[in-house]
Amino acid sequence: KKISHALVTGGAGFIGSHLVEALATDGCRVTVLDNLSTGHRHNLDGAGDRIDFVEGDIRDAQLLDRVIKGCEVVFHQAAVVSVTQTVKDPSHSCEVNDLGTVRVLDAARRNDVRRVVLASSSAVYGDDPRLPKTEDMAPRPLSPYAVQKLAGEFYASTFMDLYGLETVCLRYFNVFGPRQDPSSPYSGVISIFMTQATAGQAPTIYGDGGQTRDFVNVKDVVGANLMAAGNPSAAGGIFNVGTGACIRIRDLWSLIGDLSGVAIDPVFGPARAGDIRESVSDISKIGDALGFSPRVALRQGLVDTLAWY
Ligand code: UD1
């Protein structure tokens, strides 16, 4: 069954804008709430005229009440997404990532939203040495970011228990694809490496580059969100969204170099505070419950993404 009307917070951002596009293509009416702190209006150029764009902040309860009215599903994507930024400014990121999330949940329950799908993060696992990461492992947050995302999950389940608001939390692993903003030093590593490769510059690898990440294409993340919104049995669930495979950061640089035709040695810098060493998902839970399986292979996804630069 199609979603009639959805709110996407952070809908002008990287992941949000892809989700908005897919929903609009599906014939869903979409309201976007974004304060454009890291998102861009032009990310929505391809979304057509079925969307209502509202510039504003998720901490603004009155505005939320207004934009959420009549929405069946809320996809909560707005956040301070950089781990490093939350290490630098834990208070501001707590306001956005936690107070903002509570405001969204609260507006949703007051306005009879059927379901809220929340963007959580694999960062909640921290450095649990057991791999791959399964949803039943005890969280070990290592950064304010991870604490904030974990708190969001607890709020979600509490809102479901207390108020009957259906919630689903998706623990994204490392998402990549076109429109991931490369302009800040806190951007996702693939967007940074691609900017450097196309400019012929050496990247900086933090630490020895032996850290691993499970890179999942944004198209697959959109697919997981649609499954989480539509499947009745997903309510109350927490699911990994990854590929089940991983690559070391130094090998990622070599691969992006190969694909863009450059061979530049990286510069190695100190390891990042709060950085996780090994990250790879177990995706059997979301596969079994929602029928999710990643469609875009890393190499193909990188080729598609490079074309955007
Ligand atoms: C990322 C996401 C976060 C998400 C999490 C899930 C971003 C900005 N952050 O955090 O929202 O919840 O994944 O796991 O997308 N690196 C370098 N050189 C660089 C940049 C990064 O070596 O120039 C290394 C980092 O030290 C890290 C790895 O690459 O080990 C990935 O970094 P990054 O893309 O910032 O993502 P995460 O910190 O994993």
Image: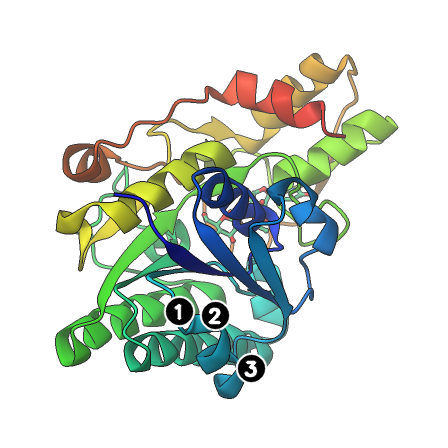
Q: In the structure shown, which secondary structural element does the residue marked by tag 1 occupy? A: helix
Q: Are marks 1 and 2 in contact (CB under 8 Å)?
A: yes
For mark 3, does the 10 Å Cα neighbourhood hold few (<14), some (14 to 19), or many (20 or more) residues? Answer: few
Q: Which amino acid lies under the numbered mark 2 shown in the image of this protein?
A: Pro
Give the mark nearest the N terminus, 2 or 3: 3
* Residue at the image position 43 percent from the left and 48 percent from the top: 28
Q: Relative to 182, is 73 on the left or the right?
A: left
Residue 112 x, y percent position in the rendering: 27, 74
In the image shown, does 65 or 181 lie closer to the viewer?
A: 65
Q: Which amino acid lies under the numbered mark 3 shown in the image of this protein?
A: Ser
Q: Any atom of ligand 1 within 8 Å of the CB at mark 3?
A: no
Give the mark nearest the N terminus, 1 or 3: 3
* Residue at the image position 49 percent from the left and 55 percent from the top: 30
Residue at the disc numbered 2: 144
Spatial CA distance of label 1 from label 2 is: 5 Å
Residue 241 in sight in this render:
no
Residue at the disc numbered 1: 147
Residue 205 x, y percent position in the rendering: 67, 39
Q: Residue furthest bottom?
A: 62
For mark 2, does the 10 Å Cα neighbourhood hold few (<14), some (14 to 19), or many (20 or more) residues? Answer: many
In the image shown, does 103 or 47 lie closer to the viewer?
A: 47
Residue at the disc numbered 3: 91
Q: In the structure shown, which secondary structural element does the residue marked by tag 2 occupy? A: helix
Q: In the structure shown, which secondary structural element does the residue marked by tag 3 occupy? A: helix
Q: Quadrant of residue 56?
A: bottom right
In the image shown, does 10 or 24 lie closer to the viewer?
A: 24
Image quadrant occupied by the N terminus: top left
Q: Which amino acid lies under the numbered mark 1 shown in the image of this protein?
A: Val
Residue 111 x, y percent position in the rendering: 33, 78
